[in-house]
Amino acid sequence: MNNIDFSPLFRSMIGFDRMTSALENASRSEPGGYPPYNIEASGENDYRITMAVAGFSQKDLSLEVRENILTVSGGRPEEEDGSRRFLYRGIANRSFERKFQLADYVKVVDARLENGLLHIDLRREIPEAMKPRKIEIRGDSQRFIDGSANEAAA
């Protein structure tokens, strides 16, 4: 297995120490699989996961977000009545569980089932405190004026 050395990145990137474990988890997950899905970006901060879940009803599907991992699972009860006799069974009646690692501040905003496709809409909502802001640089002759220091001087 190839090991990638991320130490050069950590020299200039602060707070990305979780990135290595996320990349390792992504490399271990199997490509493709069941059910098939698409991931698309529908804007700068909007995303959509579309999964082909034909044969599953709304009550057969479950979505859960825990610790930035979106888990989509589905399962149908096995038919045990024996009234149906299949000559060929090409449509799978199997359960599934698919996990997606979400970046910080990515939230699930909507999920709906249409024509056998499960659409999960996601949005990155960055808090105001995390958005870029301009920092003023003071010169030597300028004093920092604090509200409490002003009141004490008066």
Image: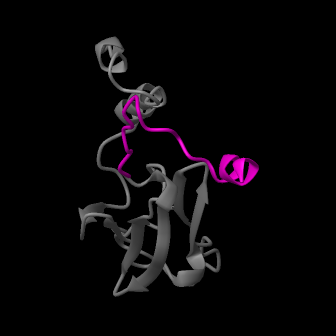
Most foreground residue, 146 or 132? 146
| Image position, residue 152 (x, y; %) | 75, 48
Q: Is residue 36 left or right of residue 100?
A: left
Can the viewer see residue 97 in this picture?
A: no
Instruction: Specify whether residue 145 is painted magenta.
Output: yes
Stretch of the chain drawn in magenta:
133-154
Q: Is residue 147 left or right of residue 69?
A: right
Residue 40 higher or lower than 129, as above or below: below
Can the viewer see residue 119 in this picture?
A: yes
Residue 129 higher or lower than 26, as above or below: below
Dividing the image into 4 quarters, which one contains the N terminus?
A: top left
Most foreground residue, 106 or 81? 106
Disc tally is 0
| Image position, residue 38 (x, y; %) | 27, 63
What type of secondary structure mainly makes up the magenta span? loop
The residue at 56%/46% (across/down) is 145
The residue at 41%/33% (across/down) is 141
Residue furthest front as drawn: 154
The image quarter in which residue 27 lies = top left
The image quarter in which residue 154 lies = bottom right
Instruction: Specify whether residue 143 is painted magenta.
Output: yes
The residue at 42%/25% (across/down) is 20
Residue 54 higher or lower than 139, as above or below: below
The residue at 43%/30% (across/down) is 16
Most foreground residue, 123 or 118? 123
Residue furthest right as drawn: 152
| Image position, residue 55 (x, y; %) | 43, 79
| Image position, residue 106 (x, y; %) | 45, 59
